[in-house]
Image (cartoon, rainbow, N blue to C red):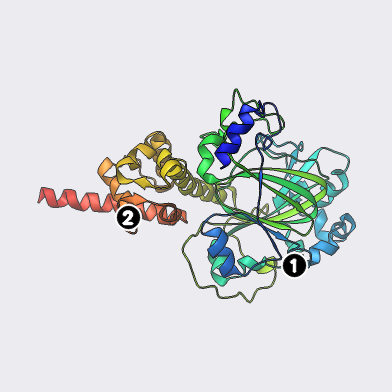
């Protein structure tokens, strides 16, 4: 039906040339529910299948919703010492940020300058943010949480077109945002750079001659106001625009698509939660962050490669016979990442890669379906599978020599 609508619009001469990203076709509204749902429902109906949802008014009971004025921020002595990261320019370019400044200095400048604070939520403010209800499980909070990030500006920000290889639950405390999204099954149409998770397309004026894929994408729209939260599934392309004094907090956690029993946590706010990659400046040494990012890039890229393969897009699964073809275009990149993370540059043979396939093919049906790809929920899992393939190959060689 959506393809028919695209075709009709093209016949009528509507191609979306030089329009803002997301206006190339009618965007489907992201489903909305009132308030948060419980963790079991959230993971079963949204996270595991990878379906976005807006939780209307879910953050209105947060202390931050009432308290977070500039005066309140400056009332903390820590604001003078806590360093934050920010970008110069409200239209994101991914060309690097500025030297960190104190939180207090940023607050004094952001209304008069073209600045955008993107930083770890300061610890002295975390007590104002209750743990988001759908994430309130011991397993999630102790094993999967990666980061808690503050997005703070005077409004008018525009992100690049990008995707995240983390799950993302974003709660808007002040202002208004519009999110334009596209299903991860259409990643190949998004013109993402191989060396990054974003595109160089101008989100204000899409040149369809240079970026023709955007004329075929089915877009989704989530327009949220202060107090709303939105779940953005991993690998879903999205661009975010904001209006008015704007503060949002998002929680990133590792991909995990296997059902689990949720035991509610005794923790009540984010101040007590430890993150595996906390973006607070000084939390971890630079080398630790680099190592973590390298490993995350490995598993994230591997999942992305499989998700964006022709077989997955057309048939919804990857047959064994096409597994190597799905990897071929980026095999050098994968091997570079393996060398960086594992410290072993030996190329895997096709036989070894097919053993990787066999370990991923949980139901032994000679195909990888979306759920099996998503079982690569951590870097450790991927590295374990690759090392197992090498170990089995080594044992087979030893037997042949005997």
Q: Give the distance between the C-alpha atoms of the residues marked 1 and 2, in whole angstroms.
A: 43 Å
Q: Position of residue 51 (x, y in %)?
A: 57, 54
Q: Which label number is shown at residue 39?
A: none
Viewport quadrant of the N terminus: top right
Please name the residue shown 54% across and 33% down the image: 193
Looking at the image, which is closer to me, 28 or 151?
Answer: 28
Numbered disc 2: secondary structure: helix
Height in image: 105 above or below 145?
above
In the rendered view, would you say 193 is above or below 72? above
Q: Residues within 10 Å of mark 1 (few under 14, many from 20)?
A: some
State the SS at label 1.
helix
Residue 236 visible in the displayed image: yes
Q: Nearer the viewer, residue 19 or 356?
A: 19
- Is 18 on the left or on the right of 378, as rendered? right
Between 402 and 113, which is closer to the camera in this rendering? 113
Instruction: Pick out the residue farthest to the top.
Output: 209
Quarter occupied by residue 219: top right
Furthest-left residue in this view: 402
Q: Depth check: 138 or 394 in front?
A: 138
User: Which residue is found at the position 41% from the left and 55% from the top?
Assistant: 372
Q: Which residue is mark 1?
A: 127
Q: Residue 175 location, x and y as percent?
A: 81, 51
Residue at the (40%, 48%) spot, across then down? 317
User: Going by the image, does 51 lie left or right of 172?
Assistant: left
Q: Which residue is mark 2?
A: 359
| Whether residue 273 is visible | no
Badge 2 crowding class, 10 Å Cα cut-off, few under 14, some 14 to 19, many 20 or more, is: some
Can you give x and y, in whole percent of width and height, for residue 113 in the image? 85, 38
């Amino acid at each position: 039906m959506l393809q028919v609508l695209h075709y009709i619009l093209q016949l009528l001469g509507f191609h979306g040339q030089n329009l803002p990203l997301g206006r190339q076709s009618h965007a489907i509204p992201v489903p909305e529910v009132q308030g948060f749902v419980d963790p079991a429902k959230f993971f079963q109906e949204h996270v595991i299948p990878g379906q976005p949802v807006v939780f209307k008014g879910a953050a209105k009971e947060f202390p931050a919703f009432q308290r977070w004025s500039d005066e309140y921020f400056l009332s903390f002595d820590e604001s003078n010492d806590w360093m934050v990261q920010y970008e110069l320019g409200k239209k994101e370019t991914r060309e690097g940020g500025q030297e960190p400044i104190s939180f207090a200095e940023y607050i004094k400048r952001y209304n008069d300058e073209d600045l955008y604070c993107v930083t770890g939520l300061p610890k002295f403010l975390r007590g104002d943010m209750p743990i988001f209800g759908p994430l309130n499980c011991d397993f999630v909070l102790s094993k999967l949480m990666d980061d808690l990030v503050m997005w703070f500006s005077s409004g008018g920000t525009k992100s690049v077109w990008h995707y995240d290889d983390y799950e993302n639950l974003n709660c808007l405390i002040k202002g208004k945002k519009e999110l334009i999204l596209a299903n991860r099954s259409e990643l190949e149409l998004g013109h993402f750079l191989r060396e990054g998770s974003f595109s160089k397309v101008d989100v204000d004026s899409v040149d369809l001659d240079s970026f023709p894929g955007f004329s075929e994408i089915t877009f989704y729209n989530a327009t949220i106001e202060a107090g709303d939260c939105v779940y953005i599934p991993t690998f879903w392309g999205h661009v975010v625009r904001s209006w008015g004094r704007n503060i949002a907090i998002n929680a990133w956690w590792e991909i995990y698509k296997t059902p689990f029993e949720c035991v509610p946590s005794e923790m009540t706010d984010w101040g007590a939660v430890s993150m595996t990659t906390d973006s607070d400046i000084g939390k971890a040494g630079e080398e630790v962050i680099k190592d973590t990012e390298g490993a995350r890039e490995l598993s994230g890229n591997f999942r992305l490669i499989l998700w964006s393969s022709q077989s997955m897009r057309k048939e919804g699964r990857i047959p064994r016979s096409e597994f190597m073809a799905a990897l071929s275009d980026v095999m050098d990149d994968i091997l570079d990442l393996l060398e960086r993370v594992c410290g072993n540059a030996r190329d895997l043979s096709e036989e070894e890669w097919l053993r990787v396939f066999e370990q991923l093919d949980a139901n032994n049906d000679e195909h990888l379906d979306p759920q099996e790809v998503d079982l690569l929920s951590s870097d450790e899992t991927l590295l374990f599978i690759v090392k197992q393939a090498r170990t089995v190959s080594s044992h087979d060689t030893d037997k042949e020599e005997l």
